[in-house]
């Protein structure tokens, strides 16, 4: 497993009292993925990058939060800062229910 893969899969919290990093591991992972995306991008493929990133990130985010909450949608909505109806709409859109 390389260092970047390890960073993605290492779910251990930062040690108590640790100084905050300049960027979070999550933001570093996103930055790395976007750098790779642009390095491999062909000009004709460019466009609607915001929508692409959001669609790629939202499904695994919802899945992970639901797993963390053991399927409790009310708790998942609270953690996400969404109301339950919005969460349900997103779950249906991603065919997670």
Image (cartoon, rainbow, N blue to C red):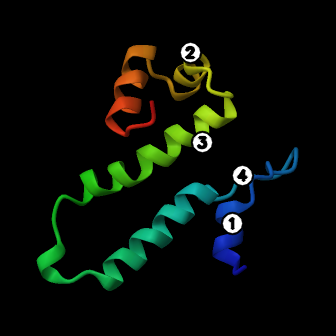
Residue 48 in the image: above or below residue 46: above
Out of 20 and 5, give the one closest to the viewer: 5
Q: Earlier in the sequence, mark 1 or mark 3?
A: 1
Q: Residue at x 56, y 15 (%)?
A: 74
Q: Position of residue 15 (x, y in %)?
A: 87, 50
Q: Secondary structure at mark 4?
A: loop
Q: Earlier in the sequence, mark 4 or mark 2?
A: 4
Q: Would you say the residues marked 1 and 3 are in contact, meaning their CB atoms lie under 8 Å apart? A: no
Q: Which residue is mark 2?
A: 74
Q: Give the CA separation, mark 4 to mark 2.
A: 30 Å
Q: Earlier in the sequence, mark 2 or mark 1?
A: 1
Q: Which residue is mark 4?
A: 20
Q: Would you say the residues marked 3 and 4 are in contact, meaning their CB atoms lie under 8 Å apart? A: no
Q: Residue at x 69, y 81 (%)?
A: 2
Q: Earlier in the sequence, mark 3 or mark 2?
A: 3
**Residue 64, labelled with which disc?**
3
Q: Would you say the residues marked 1 and 4 are in contact, meaning their CB atoms lie under 8 Å apart? A: no
Q: Position of residue 44 (x, y in %)?
A: 11, 78
Q: Which residue is mark 1?
A: 7
Please give left or right for residue 17 compared with residue 27 in the image.
Answer: right
Q: Give the CA separation, mark 1 to mark 4.
A: 16 Å
Q: Which mark is nearer the camera, 1 or 3? A: 3
Q: Position of residue 4 (x, y in %)?
A: 64, 74
Please give left or right for residue 7 compared with residue 53 in the image.
Answer: right
Residue 47, quarter of picture = bottom left
Q: Give the CA separation, mark 1 to mark 3.
A: 16 Å
Label 3: few (<14), some or many (≥20) within 10 Å? Answer: some
Q: Secondary structure at mark 3?
A: helix
**Quadrant location, the N terminus:** bottom right
Label 4: few (<14), some or many (≥20) within 10 Å? Answer: few
Residue 83 in the image: above or below residue 15: above
């Amino acid at each position: 497993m390389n260092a970047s893969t390890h960073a993605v899969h290492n779910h251990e919290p930062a040690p108590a009292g640790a100084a905050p990093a300049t960027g979070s591991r999550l933001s570093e992972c996103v930055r790395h993925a976007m750098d790779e995306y642009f390095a491999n991008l062909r000009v004709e493929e460019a466009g609607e990058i915001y929508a692409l990133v959001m669609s790629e990130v939202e499904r695994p985010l919802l899945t992970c939060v639901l797993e963390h909450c053991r399927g409790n949608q009310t708790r998942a909505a609270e953690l996400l800062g969404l109301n339950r109806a919005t969460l349900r709409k997103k779950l249906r859109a991603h065919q997670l229910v």
